[in-house]
Image (tube, rainbow, N blue to C red):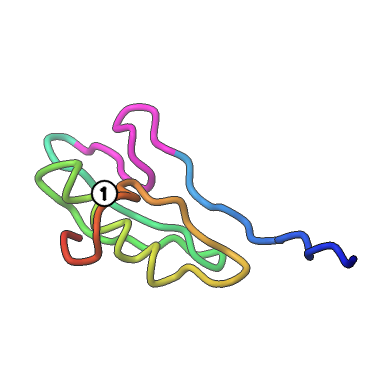
Amino acid sequence: MAEAPISKKRKRGNPNRKTGLIGVRKTGKKYQASIYVDGTSHHLGTFDTKEQAGIAYDRVAIDKSTEEVSFTLNYPKMSDHER
């Protein structure tokens, strides 16, 4: 019986120690979201809450995930409709 191929899919994203969210950092009273894709950092915007910034990150992470690379989400249980 043949063995199933080992998945080489790489997970991306580590939470920021201060915000607890991936791709989200606090700047003053606002939160900035960014994502690193294909060797380039992409600024996603500045938001009033860390939740808004985390959702912005998740939207792009879902769009940029491929068979080889998937991004870890901040809110994996949130539906696309809620996002």
Disc 1 crowd, CA 10 A, few/some/many (<14, 14-19, 20+): many
Provide the major secondary structure of the magenta segment. loop
Query: How many numbered callouts?
Result: 1
Image location of residue 44, percent across then percent down: 28, 61
Residue 78 versus residue 20 in the image, above or below: below
**In the picture, residue 2 is in which quadrant?**
bottom right
**In the picture, residue 24 is in which quadrant?**
top left
Q: Which residues are magenta?
A: 15-27
Tell me, yes or no, whether the highlighted magenta stretch contains residue 67.
Answer: no
Residue 23 versus residue 71 in the image, above or below: above
Q: Which residue is mark 1?
A: 54
Front residue (pair 76, 66): 76
Image location of residue 22, percent across then percent down: 38, 44
Tell me, yes or no, whether the highlighted magenta stretch contains residue 16.
Answer: yes
At numbered mark 1, what does the secondary structure look like: helix, strand or loop? helix
Q: Residue furthest right?
A: 1
Front residue (pair 39, 71): 71
* Quarter in which the N terminus is drawn: bottom right
Residue for point 20% across, 60% down: 83
In this picture, residue 38 sits left or right of residue 76 = right
Residue for point 52% across, 61% down: 70
Residue 15 versus residue 72 in the image, above or below: above
Image location of residue 61, percent across then percent down: 39, 62
In this picture, residue 59 sits left or right of residue 9 = left
In this picture, residue 53 sits left or right of residue 14 = left
Residue for point 71% across, 61% down: 8
Front residue (pair 67, 2): 2
Callout 1 amino acid? Gly
Image location of residue 6, percent across then percent down: 77, 59
Q: Residue furthest front?
A: 1
